[in-house]
Amino acid sequence: MNPDNPVVLKKRVVLVTGGGRGIGAATVRLASQRGWSVCINYRNKDTEAKKLADEINQSGGTAIPIKADVSREADVISLFDTVDAELGMIHALVNNAGIIAPQSQLVDVSADRLRKIFDTNVVGSFLCAREAVKRMSVSRGGSGGSIVNLSSSAARIGSPNEFIDYAASKGAIDTMTLGLSKEVAEEGIRVNAVRPGLIETEMHLDTGDIHRLQKLREWVPMKRVGSSSEVASTIVWLMSDDASYITGALVDVAGGR
């Protein structure tokens, strides 16, 4: 390299939905540390997302926070257009945004609750994947890329007497991952899913049982709860070239449960 004419290497760009807290925030931090430019998408966590972006930018990384509700198509389109304009071509999408509702049996579940969960967890993931595929596909002028969907071990277990609606939404993510991975393989796009188990995140507060993790940890063969950073490590690895021949995988990060 000529020191008088240095070559500036452009960072790869990743969009992390629901990146303001928990697994999303851990993924944002680790991706930045690994050299990615990061878009932190959020819906309600304004303060947290902006603080995280400032933290990354002040440490020499590149991050932008963008507010968007992934269950709304217009928001998703605007989100991706903003990433195009401010960060450039997207190379990875982490479909992390998701919601859960208080524990309930199906007989007490309302249609409104079902719509909210499926609109965010399923429709939102589909919409974001659609926009990512449009940009990454080699036949459309892209350079390929990686999509990592956040599923859950609940998709395997079913979560009876707690939230089978949430579990079913994650089952849909598993199916979407398998189908889309085959659909876009020749476009240079890899699609995988990570299925976390009992992980220490704020989401468990939304279930209405603050002691849930402690009560269920004995059912985990490793006898402990996982951390957001452990899930993030798997996500960022799947995004990387180290996983270049992996697509259509459903990777459990659940301590053996």
Image (cartoon, rainbow, N blue to C red):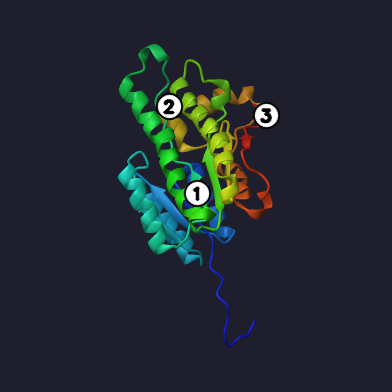
Front one among 99 and 55: 99
What element does badge 3 sit on?
loop
Which of the two discs, 2 and 3, sits closer to the camera? 3
| The C terminus, quarter of image | top right
Q: Amino acid at mark 1?
A: Leu
What element does badge 1 sit on?
strand
Residue at 42 percent of width and 61 percent of height: 54
Q: Which mark is residue 170?
A: none
| Vertical arrangement, residue 119 with respect to residue 147, above or below | above
Tell me how far mark 2 sits from mark 3, CA to CA.
23 Å
Q: Residue furthest bottom?
A: 4
| Percent x, y of residue 195 | 58, 34
Q: Amino acid at mark 2?
A: Thr
Residue 163: in sight, yes or no?
Answer: no
Q: Of the two numbered discs 2 and 3 on the same chain, state the one appearing first in sequence.
A: 2
Q: Please give the count of numbered marks on the rendered protein.
A: 3
To which residue does mark 2 refer?
A: 207
Q: Quadrant of residue 143?
A: bottom right
| Vertical arrangement, residue 29 with respect to residue 212, above or below | below
For label 2, count other residues whose C-alpha is less than 10 Å away and answer few (under 14), some (14-19) or many (20+). some
For label 3, count other residues whose C-alpha is less than 10 Å away and answer few (under 14), some (14-19) or many (20+). few
Q: Quadrant of residue 1?
A: bottom right
To which residue does mark 3 refer?
A: 256
| Percent x, y of residue 233 | 61, 47
Q: Which mark is residue 93?
A: 1
